[in-house]
Amino acid sequence: MPRKRSVALAAWGEEGLLLVLRPQDDPEFAGAWGLPAVSLQGEETLEEAALRVAREKLGAEVAEAGPIAFGVEERPGYTLELWVYEGRLLGRPRLPEPKPGKTYYAAFRFGRPEELKAAARQGSLCSRLFLAVKGLCP
């Protein structure tokens, strides 16, 4: 089974944890508030991918990003290997215009980690991992 390697980013701003709204046509978690993520490209390192999440998906930069969780999950058609990084958001996010072939987010807001519980119940691995690290059950 093919492997997909991804990095999700738990980005903290002055107003709390940055949450992103997945689009309604998302095949896995339509309309869920969760953490932004990207799939690794080529020889990209995990750290490079974590910084790219902020740049590419949020139009922002992140500082002090480091790994806090890792998980593996079998999904229909592939095996997901997912790392969750946590960092400090620099500046206010600006969601970019969507480009074909990638998941872009419909909106963002700042909130609390507990607000990831709905996405975790829908099956979001990054939400489940982040909640577990923070000692919050999904």
Image: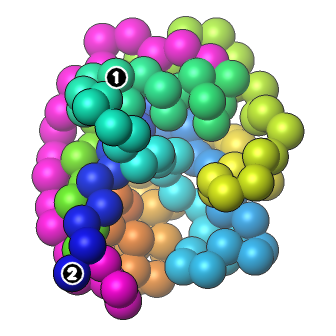
Please give left or right for residue 112 compared with residue 91 in the image. Answer: left
The structure's colour scheme is rainbow
Q: Is residue 6 left or right of residue 69?
A: right
Frontmost of labels 2 and 1 is 2
Q: Which residue is mark 1?
A: 48
Of the numbered discs 2 and 1, the one sitting upstream in the chain is 2
Which numbered dot is residue 1? 2
Q: Answer whether residue 9 is magenta in the image.
A: no
Q: At numbered mark 2, what does the secondary structure look like: helix, strand or loop? A: loop
Which of the 4 quarters of the picture holds residue 135? bottom left
Above-or-below relation of 54 to 129: above
Q: Is residue 113 or residue 31 the one in the foreground?
A: 31
| Residue 131 rendering spot, x and y as whole percentages | 28, 58
* Residue 133: x %, y % from top left: 17, 50
Q: In the visual, does 48 lie left or right of 112?
A: left
Q: Residue at x 31, y 61 (%)?
A: 4
Q: Label 1 amino acid?
A: Glu
Q: Can you tell which quarter of the image residue 48 is in?
A: top left
Q: Which residues are magenta?
A: 60-78
Q: Is residue 30 above or below residue 37?
A: below
- The vertical placement of 87 against 132, above or below, is above
